[in-house]
Amino acid sequence: MQEVRVAIVGMGIGKANALAITRNPRGRVVALCDLLEDRMVEFAADLPEPVQMFTDYNEMCRSSEIDAVFVGTPNQFHVPVAMEALRNGKHVLVTKPLADGEEPAKQLVELAESTGLVNMMSLSTRFSVAVQHLGQMGQRGEFGEIYYARARSIRRQGIPAWSPGFILKGGGAFRDMGVHVLDSAWWLLGMPEPVSVTGVAGAKFGPLGKGYWGKGAPPAQEYFSQFAADDYGSGFIRFANGAGLQVESFWASHQPGEVNIELFGTEAGAQLRPLTIYRMNGNMEENATIEMPENANLLAWDNVAGHFIDSILDGTPCIAPLRHGWLVQRMMEGLLKSAETGQEVRLD
Ligand SMILES: NC(=O)c1ccc[n+]([C@@H]2O[C@H](COP(=O)([O-])OP(=O)(O)OC[C@H]3O[C@@H](n4cnc5c(N)ncnc54)[C@H](O)[C@@H]3O)[C@@H](O)[C@H]2O)c1
């Protein structure tokens, strides 16, 4: 096989993934699937070749013209769609979070690993130029031992107002934004085994119709009265190697917006935004800032699409299998459970 024929499910974040696949010389987008036909028709006009359109993912998965499926539905449908694709012999690329809870995430990973098909998380933060740069420095040992990290994703007012999947059970700020910085920080720490998590979480804005995305009119009450998730979460994860990670995610807050990861290493430290390396040279403090290429955002998606295609066509070992999505989900669900019970949750 010289190329991968991909079907895209979900015309939200599916579009960025689809365009990256079409930018890859070995990737083709051959089908779209969404409940809303208009969205597919509109997006199809941006694609380089005609596509088949489906409103039923089950039917789409039966097509022999498709090698792989990108899953970009609301969280609550990631597992059913990915399972159907795998059962029909398709490789899968799944957006974050892997699932809307830990048990479905585990079941999907078990199925995926039993098939031998490529199964990968689409992680725009882990595959970003900046996180990959830090990862390569870490692999060369330039930070020494990374023994602590802080990760946060904070918005002033950024509760999604466009899809109830975000605010229903299985949605929430932590599974939406916390997941990105948690995944990347854990990956940069060398993916240590988590042993425990303690956290706080809740909903202080969303159920009241406050803190929604943008500066326009708040959403209708029929929308926000469905709120059944967290709009903030924060916690501390302890790892078997002694490392610690503090992670915070706020969809809305009376704080300036910020997305950042800070690494504390024995030889050097770093922060993600702006990308900066901190070292001592004798008594001198050396701070090195690293400039990002102008197309850094697009490159993240190209990295995801390229790695997925290489894993399928060349057998390149996948560095972001669904198993990683499950392990991150365990930490997230543990944090949210700890917030609910007021107790530390053991993960070992
Ligand atoms: N950077 C990232 O990686 C990133 C960014 C945004 C969203 N996401 C993830 O993408 C997912 C969707 O978020 P979004 O912002 O794109 O939402 P969205 O509402 O804009 O898009 C989701 C689409 O899925 C469609 N859909 C819903 N159920 C479906 C089904 N059963 N079959 C086919 N189509 C279905 C909807 O009609 C909608 O068009 C979420 O899980 C979110 O966490 C990831």
Image: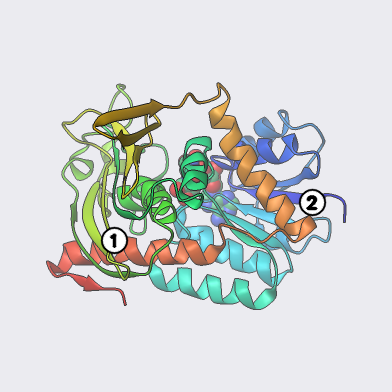
For the rendered model, the colour scheme is: rainbow
Which residue corresponds to mark 1?
243
SS under mark 2: strand
Q: Disc 1 vs disc 2: which is toward the camera?
A: 1
Q: Which residue sits at x=54%, y=41%?
A: 13
User: Circle 1 — which element?
Assistant: loop
In this picture, is 68 found above or below 304?
below
**Residue 163 place in picture, x, y as percent:** 42, 43
Nearest to the observer: residue 35 or residue 123:
123
- Residue 248 x %, y %: 25, 47
- Label 2, residues with CA under 10 Å away: few <14, some 14-19, many ≥20: many
Answer left or right for 220 relative to 71: left
Which comes before the other along the chain, label 1 or label 2?
A: 2
Q: Is residue 113 visible?
A: yes
Nearest the viewer among 340 and 77 is 340
Q: Give the numbered dot on residue 14.
A: none
Residue 95 in percent (x, y) is at 53, 51
The quarter of the picture where the C terminus appears is bottom left
| Residue located farthest toward the right when viewing the structure as drawn | 1
**Is 128 located above or below residue 196 in the figure?**
above
* Three-letter amino acid code of the residue under disc 2: Val
Q: Tell me the residue at 33%/58% (across/down).
A: 169
Residue on which disc 2 sits: 4
**Amino acid type, label 1:** Ala
Task: Classify residue 64 as left or right of residue 127.
Answer: right
Q: Residue at x 41, y 53 (%)?
A: 183
Whole-percent x and y of residue 274? 37, 28
In which quadrant of the rendered image does the N terminus lie?
bottom right
- Specify whether 63 is left or right of 82: right
Q: Is residue 37 visible?
A: no
